Image (tube, rainbow, N blue to C red):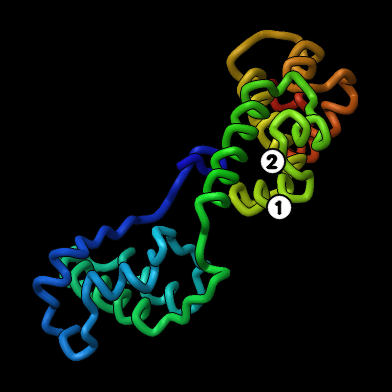
């Protein structure tokens, strides 16, 4: 999965649905939570579900972190069971179901993202991207923000500034050349954007390091 800034801080819990059906953990026997139950609830019609976290899930996952070493294994055993109980009572509606069509759109957005980040020296308009990839402009903007957390313009600008900072540190290229490499025809506009990001001008950033 491609994530903003190629960085992910979290954990993945994998559940073998067949094994869960064959041997339900003792603490879950009364709830009758089986692999078949989970599959039917969250993967019906060969689709998968996606939903945002909340205070309940936060309280569950918080305990995977920052616990004394001697207690970690116990928490790792108990918390997945608590998560299963939460999933059992969770109300799933159609809006939580991601269709194959929607999944293909997400992959398309990731392709667009790769094009943008690989060509920071170029400027792509929403309309141009929409026509190139045959996707509605509103859909493009909405799905991009869902996947990457910010608008296209804001996300690309962040990458431009990070690339510029890297070039300032690792090369002796002029600020004008660096500005051009990250998509700015005007050095003054580039310097203004850089200062907005790093609270100093590119020349100051280079001297400081």
Where residue 103 appears, as percent x and y from the top left, is 52, 49
User: What residue would you read off at disc 1?
Assistant: 142
Left or right: where does residue 9 sit relative to residue 175? left
Marks 2 and 1, how far apart in space? 13 Å
> In terms of secondary structure, where does tag 2 sit?
helix
Q: Identify the residue shown where x is 59% and y is 38%.
A: 108
Find residue 130 and report its image quarter: top right
Please name whichever residue, 172 or 88, is drawn nearer the observer in this view of the structure: 88
Left or right: where does residue 117 sit relative to residue 91? right
| Quadrant of the rendering where the C terminus is positioned | top right
Left or right: where does residue 3 sit relative to residue 67? right
Q: Identify the residue shown where x is 69% and y is 41%.
A: 155
Q: Identify the residue shown where x is 78% and y is 19%.
A: 179
Find residue 192 and report its image quarter: top right
User: What residue would you read off at disc 2?
Assistant: 155
Find residue 17 and report its image quarter: bottom left
């Amino acid at each position: 999965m491609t994530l903003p800034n190629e960085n992910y801080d979290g954990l993945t819990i994998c559940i073998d649905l067949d094994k869960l059906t064959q041997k339900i953990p003792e603490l879950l026997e009364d709830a009758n939570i089986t692999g078949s139950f989970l599959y039917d609830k969250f993967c019906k019609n060969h689709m998968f579900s996606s939903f945002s976290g909340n205070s309940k899930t936060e309280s569950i996952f918080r305990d995977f972190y920052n616990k004394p070493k001697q207690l970690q294994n116990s928490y790792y055993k108990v918390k997945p069971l608590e998560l299963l109980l939460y999933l059992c009572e969770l109300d799933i509606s159609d809006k939580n179901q991601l269709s194959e069509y929607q999944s293909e759109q997400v992959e398309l957005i990731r392709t667009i993202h790769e094009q943008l980040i690989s060509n920071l020296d170029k400027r792509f308009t929403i309309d141009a991207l929409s026509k190139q990839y045959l996707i509605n402009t509103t859909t493009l903007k909405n799905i991009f923000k869902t996947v990457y957390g910010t608008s296209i313009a804001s996300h690309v600008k962040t990458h431009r500034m990070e690339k510029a900072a890297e070039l300032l540190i690792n090369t002796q290229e002029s600020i004008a050349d660096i500005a051009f490499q990250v998509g700015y025809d005007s050095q003054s506009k580039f310097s203004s954007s850089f200062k907005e990001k790093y609270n100093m001008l590119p020349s100051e950033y280079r001297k400081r390091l």
